[in-house]
Every structure is written in C-alpha cells, then in structure tokens.
Amino acid sequence: MLKENLGELTAIKTGRLDVNAENPTGKYPFFTCSKNHTYIDQFAFDGEFVLVAGNGDLNVKYYNGKFNAYQRTYVIQAKSKLDGKYLFYFLESYIEKLREQSIGGVIKYIKIGNLTDAKIPLPPLETQKDIAQILDDAAALRDKTRQLIKEYDVLAQSIFLEMFGDPVRNEKGFELRILQDFYFNMKEGTKCGPFGGALKKEEFVESGIAVWNMDNISKNGELIEIINLWITPEKYEKLKSYSVENNDIIISRAGTVGKMCVVNSNFKKSIISTNLIRLRLNSDKLLPLFFSFMMNHFKDRVGRLKKGSDDGFTHMNTGILNTLSFPYPPIDLQNQFAEKITLIKQQKELAKQELKESEDLFNCLLQKAFKGELG
C-alpha cells in the first residue's frame, strides 16, 4: 500500500498557552498533555483536529469543534487527501513508536519531525472513511462496556447509602464503635509490613511466595492479582507473622494513604510489604467487605487515616486504626449488603471479561487497518 509522510498530508501547529491558562468553568475545551481535557474561556482552533501530547505520557485525542491548546500539544489537521478520523486511529496505532522516539530526561518529549516524518498508509479517501467507521464501531463497543463497569460502581454506592446513609452524619443513628473491638484478636488484628532489614530489596526473587504491595490495591478498593514482588519459601518461613489470609484487609500506609481492599486470592501463601498494614477482623461481628467498602468509597468524608511529620511525610500506623470510630450497623444488615455487593461484583467481572474481549478486538482491528488488511 502507498505510504506518504504525514507532514505532506497535514497542517501541524502547537497551542500557545501555558497550562495555567485553564478555567475549569470555561466554555471551551482546553487540551494539555493530560489524557483528559479541562476548560478555558477563549478558543483558538475551530474544526476537526487530532491532538498529540508533546511531552509526558504521550497520548492522542480527537476533537471536532472550538477549543484551545497548551503550548506543548501538537494540533494536527488533515488536508484533502486524508480523513480526520483515519488520521486519529493511525496515530493511536503509532503512539508506541512515538514513545520510542521521545527524548529528554525525567520528562520525555517528541519533536515535530517525529510526526512529519511518520509514514502513513494512504488508501483512497472512501476506503479511509470505511476503515475509520469500522474502528469507530469497535471503539463504541469497548467504551460502552467501560461505562457499564462504572455504572456498577455507582450502583454499589447507591445501595450503600440506601442501607446505611452517610457514614459521617450517621443518618441512620447506628451505634458508634471503635475498630479494635472487632479484631480477630489484639495480637493479630493489625500488623505493619516488615521494616528495616527484615526484608531487603536484594531478597526479592523471580517467583515463589507472593508479596502484596500498594500497587495491588486499585483506586476502587479492589484487589489486583498481578504480583511483582516474590520471596523464597525459606524467607517466608522467617516472615510468617506478616502472612495474609483470604478475608484479611490490606491497607496502604504510605503514598496514597488509606487505600484498602479485601484479599480473596488463589495464593495459598503470601505476605504484606513494608508499605502495607494487614487488618484481620472477626467477620462474625464486622464484615471486612462492609468495612473496606465504607472506608474506600467515603474516605474523603470519613477522614484520611494518616498523620504528618515535620519533614512532610504522611503515613498511617496501627494505633490510628485501633481507635478509629465509625457507625456500626447490625451484622445482619452488613450480610444483606454483602450479598448485594457480591452479585454486583459477579456481574462486574463478566463485564470486565467482555471489556478485555472488546479491547482485544479493537486492537486487532487497529493493527490490521494500517497493514492493508481492513477495509
């Protein structure tokens, strides 16, 4: 298939504004190098454009209308021989190549030549439009499934509020209790990860016993079972007091403090890393799923579980958890909530599988499109 330099088929400019020019209540989209746009009061561009972040986490966006752009954002408009949506999908398929070509220190960037020298397959204009429509349809399927997953999260929060009300105002008038009343026992109730020389970086291995880390807790309070840290069985025997069982809660104690999730995994043996706390509750009295859900989805109002120091470092310790006060609903009500959330999670897992399939389909079509195998 005929290929031409992108620079001959497009007009490429950059925005002129500093990132601080934004106004969140402005009328027009303001595109920076972030994946999501903000807003601004004036527009500088009007029409169909593809935008490529010039530095940072390189990404590609499509917009048709009035907008403005940050000075390190490339604003690309297709000329008569090139369809705008076809250009957008080509650059989506080309983004890894741009990342490979990026230069610089901490913040990588690309030059305009990385774009103008890119060679784009150029079938007839009608074929380009047909290819873009196929990819549009595949992207719509993917995005619909993503939205469904978000709606499951919204439904779960709605159920929580309906059953328990706002936990800060304690609208249902539940008894206030402190967390240490519900530990499995005081010795095992809370446990900080191994400190100092107990677990050194050089002791991690390629496989063996899983070590849970902060990256294993999603922002939505779900367990991510992708293990990057492992120790040997021999090391595990020395660190068994830091072990994790199913139905334990793991909590981030540094960085984004207070993220937590309930562990329910296929790993028979695992431990927590230095940056985590393990919480082991008496689930006959306080359901881990209920507690972690409340704290994850309402932590901005319940309160951040951390304390600061003179050097600005913020962290959490077991003492903060011990005395944490919260409204305590009857265990029967917690169980009813858990049953509903379990059903939602089952449907959400099915949706996640559908999302993976739709993403695989889109990526497959994207690769075929620019090898001349589509359209």
Image (cartoon, rainbow, N blue to C red):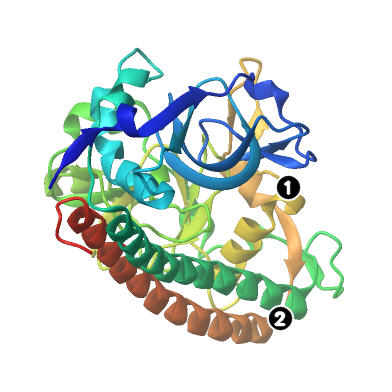
**Residue 117 in picture, x, y percent from top left:** 25, 25
Quarter that holds the C terminus: bottom left
Q: Quadrant of residue 228?
A: top left
Q: Amino acid at mark 2?
A: Pro
Q: What residue appears at the point 64 percent right and 60 percent down from the top-left corner?
A: 297
Image coordinates for residue 54, horizontal then vertical, percent: 43, 25
The residue nearer to you, when weighing 219 against 65, is 65
Q: Position of residue 127 (x, y in %)?
A: 28, 59
Above/below status of 81 relative to 223: above
Secondary element under disc 2, as helix, strand or loop, is: loop
The answer to whether 354 is drawn above or below residue 39 in the figure is: below
> Can residue 233 be seen by looking at this rendering?
yes
Where is residue 10, by image quadrant? top left
Mark 2 and mark 1: Cα distance apart in space: 23 Å
Viewer-nearest residue: 322 or 217: 217
Which residue, given by chain and number where applicable, does mark 1 sit on? Answer: 303
Residue positioned 75% across, 31% down in the render = 42
Residue bearing mark 2: 330
Secondary structure at badge 1 equals loop
Residue at 36%, 37% in the rendered image: 194
Q: Contact (CB < 8 A) between labels 2 and 1? A: no
Which residue is at a point 62% across and 43% down the rendered structure image?
A: 319
